[in-house]
Structure formats: C-alpha cells, structure tokens
Amino acid sequence: MISNKINEGINGTPIMPGDKSISHRSIIIPSISNGVCEINNILQSDDVFHTMNAFKSMGVRIEENNERLIIYGKGLNSLQEARNEIYLGNSGTSARLLTGLLSAQKFKSVLNGDSSLSKRPMKRISEPLSNMGAKIHTTNGSLPLTIDGKKLSPSNINLEIPSAQIKSGLLLASLYIKGETKITENKITRDHTETMLQSFGANIDIKKINKKKIITTVGQKELQSKNIDVPNDLSSSAFFIVAALINKNSHLTLKNINNNSSRNGILLALKKMGAKIKLKNQRNHNNENVCDIEVVSSELYGCDLGPEFADLMIDEYPILSIAASFANSPSIFRGLKELRVKESDRLKLILLNLQNCGVDCKVENDNLYIYPSNNYKIKNNIIQTDFDHRIAMSFCIMGTMVGPLNIDNKDSIKTSFPTFKKELNKLGGKIF
C-alpha cells in the first residue's frame, strides 16, 4: 500500500535497472554466436531470468556473477533440445523471440508461461513464421506452443503489426535461412535486435525508404561475440520521471539511460506537456544512444497525441496517464489498440483505476480522454493490476499524490524492476 503523500518532493539520484529489451537480446544473441561474451549491468528480473534459464536448458554455458553474465557461445547450430518444456513465466518478449529462433532449429520445442502470458496472442508471430515454412502449433492462438523445428525458406515479409517482438522473432529465424530474407516494417518499432545483430557481424542490411524500413538478411553467417554493457532502462525510468514532475519540490538525476530514438516517445510527450527535462552527457555506447536525465517539478499541460506516438512508447502510456491526470488541461491519447494485448488489457485497467482514483476519463475507439482536476476523491483504493507490472508501478506513483492506494499483485513488479520499492522509498520517505 502507498502510505503517504510526498510533501518534500522526490529528490536524489536513484539507481535505475538495466534495459529490459536489451537484456533479453544480450542473452539470446551471444548464445548463438561464437566466443565468450561478458554482459555488464544486465537486468536482474524475473522476465530476464526466464530467458537465461531457457538457454541454459538448451545447453548454453552461462555463468552468473551479480549483474554480470558470461556466456560461452558455440555458434548458430549449437543449441540442443531441452529435456522439458521451456517455461517463460510472464515474458512476452521471451515467448515471441524464442518462437522465431526455435522454429529454425533441428529439434522440437514446447513453450509455456503463466496464466497471463498464456492469454497473449501468439498467431501474430506464428503466422508470418509459417509463411517461411515454420511448423508451429498454438493453443487457440496462444501458449502452450509446440514448435517442430525445420529448415526454413527465404521470404519477403510485410509486417502488418508494428511490434519489435514480431520483427525480432523473424530476424532470429532468418539467421538460419540459406538465402535472402526481406522484412518490410511500415511503422517504427524498437531496433535493438538489428542493432545488436549488426554489431555481432550478421549479414544484415537496413534501408529506410520514406516512412518504411526494409531489413534484409542473408542467413547462415556465423556471429562473433563481443562484450555488452547494458544501458539503464528508459521505460523503468519513466515512473521516476513522472513522480518528480508531479510532486512539488522535486529534482532527480537519472544516470546512463538508454535514449534510443525508436522508443523515446515518453520524453517527447512529456516535453510537449511542458515538462522540465534536460538530457545531459549524451553519447553513443554499443551502438545505442545513452544519456543522463535531469528532471525538476513542472507545471504540465494536457496534449493531443496522435497514434504515431504509440509506436514510440506503447509501454509508457500507463505512467503517462498519471502525468496527464495532474496537468492543467485535458489530454487525448489516440490509437491505443495495442495496449489491449500487452501483459493485460492495459487500456481497460488505466480507465478503471483512474476512475477509482476519482479521475474523469473515458475511452472511445481506442482513444483515451483524461480530464484532470485539482482535487481527487478516491472512490475505491484497491488498484486492479491483473499482474501487470507497469499498471502496478504507475499507480504507485499515483499514490504519491492522492494518498493511500492498495496495489494488488505488487509482486508483478519483479518481472521488470525488482528494486522499484527500495529506490522509491529512498527518494521520498517511506512510500510503501
């Protein structure tokens, strides 16, 4: 439960976790490369542990030492059939990326997950893989999922759904295909997979034509390992950024944050709302843009965000809705259909929980409308999360402003940010 409002502000330099998206890929790609890879600052969370354990079950030697991993890769064809089904917990990234990778192996695999992951749609990755010749059996379109690994064929794939997970699964499958695979991306998505594959020596070409991105891979080229320093996670940082913006007398500095241009929509949106955010010490590291972020309390204004913002920040709409609830004017966030198929139906939960906190809001045609007030009266202090970590953390931040909230299934936070409670308490007195 959130126990008190913060009157003295959110101040300090909290330690943010390693980037979740990059952490997953930092295990997957070195595991099918040649050589030893040392990974520093990897995210120590449940989702990432599931990815790591999946590769251990397929014979990859991985040594753990706090926030450092050492992976001993033996090449593209070194994976072995797991003795049991591969359990992926709540991690949609693990499920979709591994579906692509395992479809091109010479063995059978079974993927499973928790009740939440087992409700998420998997045909969005299995169907384009089937066009490459993959043999994948879903359970009513979801997990459990059986993959009969086989030789795949070169293909031209037009991505209908803007999803980095789908794109990444297809790219991993294409590494095994003799010949050329072309993926056309019509809307921007996170580019961590192609960036890392390039740095590991994959035969991959990326062209941008108008608003489209065409990624061409020629498969069966062995990858060469290199060390990886994982930057800190912008999505996790967003909770602290918003906390500082909406709580008076706040001043935060966040260090070594990933500022990849394919996922920094939250910063662009908040600046559009009048947020005082400064990016400092900007640099390129491991082909990723990294910076330090300084945030101070700000007077926010509502804004109208078009669906193009969803391509840059779909995961950040829960916390952006909290910021909008304390703005000086209404906000409209458009084109949020993809929020319905995340770890939960996030659009439904944002609406429900904001209304329980007394916020006047509505959803029409997958557009979210928020009409802020100066004085919220809590109607129901039990926050429903459906075991969604981002909903849980967003309404923890809401509680710093409106008072006691009872967040159900707080353990979901461990999937992405195990130290969230510790860092938040450290900055503003005892909150949990």
Image (cartoon, rainbow, N blue to C red):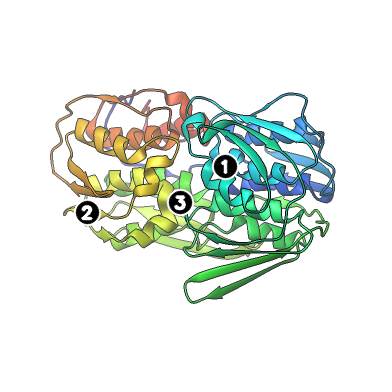
Does residue 244 appear in this view? no
Query: Residue 299 occupies which quadrant of the picture?
Result: bottom left
Give the residue type at disc 1: Thr
Element under disc 1? helix
Q: Residue at x 73, y 24 (%)?
A: 84
> Residue 265's image quarter?
bottom left
CB atoms of marks 3 and 1 within 8 Å: no
Q: Nearer the viewer, residue 136 or 186?
A: 136
**Among the two numbered marks 2 and 3 on one chain, the one whose residue lies closer to the N terminus:** 3
Which callout, 2 or 1, points at the residue further toward the start of the chain? 1
Within 10 Å of the Cα at label 3, are there few (<14), some (14-19), or many (20+) other Cα atoms?
A: many
Identify residue for label 1: 93
Label 2 neighbour load within 10 Å: few <14, some 14-19, many 20+: many
- The residue mark sitting in front, 2 or 3, is 2
Residue that mark 3 sits on? 253
Is 417 or 152 nearer to us in this picture?
152
Q: Is residue 159 above or below residue 216?
A: above
Name the residue located 71 percent from the left edge and 60 percent from the top edge.
Answer: 154
Of the 4 image quadrants, the one containing the C terminus is top left
Q: Looking at the figure, which quarter contains the N terminus?
A: top left
Q: Are marks 2 and 3 in contact (CB under 8 Å)?
A: no
Q: Label 2: which residue?
A: 331
Image spot of residue 282 (x, y percent): 54, 65
| Residue sitting at the far bottom | 210
- Give the spatial CA distance, label 3 vs label 1: 29 Å
Distance of mark 2 from mark 1, alpha carbons? Answer: 30 Å
